[in-house]
Amino acid sequence: MAHIIHLKTFSEKRGNLSVIENEIPFDIKRIFYIYGVDDSVRGGHRHKTTVQAAICINGSCVVSNNDGKKKEDFLLDHPSKCLILETKDWHTMHSFTSEAVLLVLASTKFDPSDYIYGEYPS
């Protein structure tokens, strides 16, 4: 099931530094980010082998998740909040604020055959 981890963050008068290394439970093979999203819904898939970590590094968005047994919404509203999405997690991203930047770290390189678009039956 998808779950939130809190990245180790060091705060001082000069600012904040959040650490990703040794916090993400997989080797990172792909990095991408989503921004400038209007009222569209992104995602709408799960993966056969890819595990992902999603961090809204600016602004906020909601990730709606369905693992086939439970549906849950996750508000990503702080750059130290990281959502881990397992292979069974069919997800959409929506409700992006205008300044939102969603950073996604993936355990595999892009492979179109890794995507499963159909949502679990109700």
Image (cartoon, grey):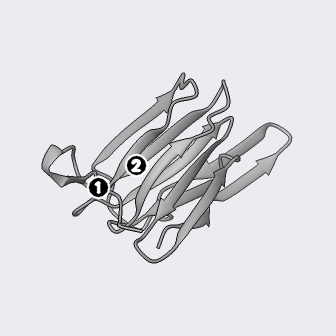
| Depicted 57 relative to depicted 84: above or below | above
Q: How far apart are the alpha carbons under marks 2 and 1?
A: 22 Å
Residue plotted at (42% across, 68% down): 122
| Depicted 122 relative to depicted 74: above or below | below
Q: Earlier in the sequence, mark 2 or mark 1?
A: 2
Residue 81 falls in which quadrant of the image?
bottom right
Residue plotted at (62% across, 58% down): 74
* Type of amino acid under label 1: Gly
> On the picture, is 92 further left or further right than 32?
right
Q: Who is closer to the viewer here, 72 or 14?
A: 72
Q: Secondary structure at mark 2?
A: strand
Q: Residue furthest left?
A: 113
- Where is residue 10 drawn, in percent x and y? 72, 53
- Where is residue 28 drawn, in percent x and y? 33, 53
Q: Residues within 10 Å of mark 2 (few under 14, many from 20)?
A: many
Residue plotted at (69% across, 55% down): 9
Residue 51 falls in which quadrant of the image?
bottom left
- Mark closer to the observer (2, 1): 1
- Identify residue for label 1: 118
- Identify residue for label 2: 105
- Where is residue 27 drawn, in percent x and y? 32, 60
| Depicted 44 relative to depicted 70: above or below | above
